[in-house]
Amino acid sequence: MPPYESGRRLCLLMEAGDTRFSVEATSVMEVAAPGPDETSLRGVLEVKDLSVLLGGEPEQTPGMVVVFDVSPTLAVRVRSIVEVADVAPAPHFLLPSGLGDTLAALSRSAVLHKERLYLEINADALPHEPGTVSPPPKLPVQLVGTAPERSLVFESQGRLFGLPLSLISQVVTRGPAFSSLPGKSGAVAGVMPHGQALWPLYSAPALLGGTSTAEELLVLAEAEGRSLGLCASRVLGVHPRFEPAEEPGEFTAPGIPAPVLFLDLRRMFS
């Protein structure tokens, strides 16, 4: 997207579902309140929930309506309008790979404005009907076969997980810059800028087929040259002397109240 001649880049910042979006102001024809029936704009344009179009849940009404200058004209309901801002001087990030082909077509970057991350969407790529957004492909579950030496143990959704200390980069708190992804994002709970890049944040229980949930702590790791994070509700610290438990991939260690499951991130993300 070329910059404005003045060096400014005006974008409309908005919230839809649990995600924040940025779109070029030149792609927006109108921003208005929905009509009395909340399903149309002035009885002419049908209003569709942006969250639903992107595979998410229905938006709470009334919300606000954004009319995009695309063909055919698209009017969508969003949860709120944040502001129109010049994002040219703001930090920009490329979205990491592995978030799904649909999202890659819709958005390739994100902008950090006032400590909040906004996914930059291409208005021309927005779907006009629900059901066209697919989640990222499911990763095959791989479990470690031998007891690790020293590992970080953390809890997610009531279950204990472990990662070898050699993979751990840092443990951080999920800050205001965290952004959920639109729709059903599989095992990815969201993305967050850290350092000079966006980190995809996975939910370990969701990698096993459960529900993806964003939690307050993030265990940042490096696996096969890829940077990724795992959500955690608490961290139990670094523990040595693991012994195999009854189930595959599970180990016990002194001072840990329950078996710890070790996902083999190296093989899963190779």
Image (spheres, rainbow, N blue to C red):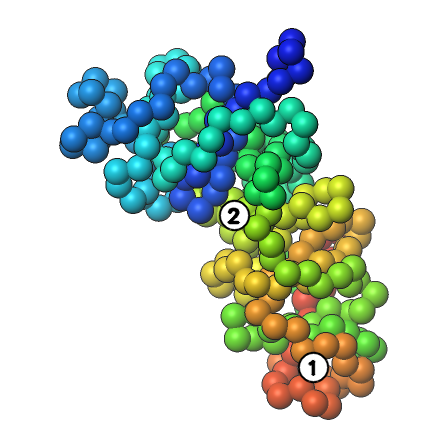
Q: Return the x and y of residue 107 as percentages of the image width and height.
A: 56, 31
Q: Is residue 64 left or right of residue 220?
A: left
Image quadrant in which the N terminus is located: top right
Front-most of residues 10 and 210: 10
Amino acid, disc 2: Ser
In this view, the residue farthest toward the bottom is: 254
Residue 171 visible here: yes
Quadrant in which residue 222 is drawn: bottom right
Q: Earlier in the sequence, mark 2 or mark 1?
A: 2
Q: Which residue is mark 1?
A: 251
The residue carrying pointer 2 sits among few (fewer than 14), some (14 to 19) or many (20 or more) residues within 10 Å by Cα, namely: many
Q: Residue furthest top?
A: 5
Please indicate whether residue 160 sits to the left or right of residue 50 in the image.
right
Q: Position of residue 206 (x, y in %)?
A: 53, 60
Q: Residue at x 16, y 32 (%)?
A: 37
Name above or below for residue 196 compared with residue 262.
above
Res 261 visible: no
> Looking at the picture, does residue 100 appear above or below residue 10?
below
Q: Check residue 130 in the rendering and tell me which mark sits there, or answer none.
A: none
For the image, the number of numbered tags is: 2
Above or below residue 166? Residue 149 is below
Q: Which residue is mark 2?
A: 180
Residue 102, compared with residue 198, is above or below; it is above
Helix, strand or loop at mark 2: loop
Q: CA distance from mark 2 to mark 1?
A: 32 Å
Q: Residue at x 47, y 61 (%)?
A: 211
Residue 27 image point, x, y percent: 47, 17
* Horizontal relation, residue 257 to residue 165: left or right: left
37 relative position to 17: left or right: left
Classify residue 35 by image quadrant.
top left
Density class for disc 1 (Cα within 10 Å; few <14, some 14-19, many ≥20) is many
At numbered mark 1, what does the secondary structure look like: helix, strand or loop? strand
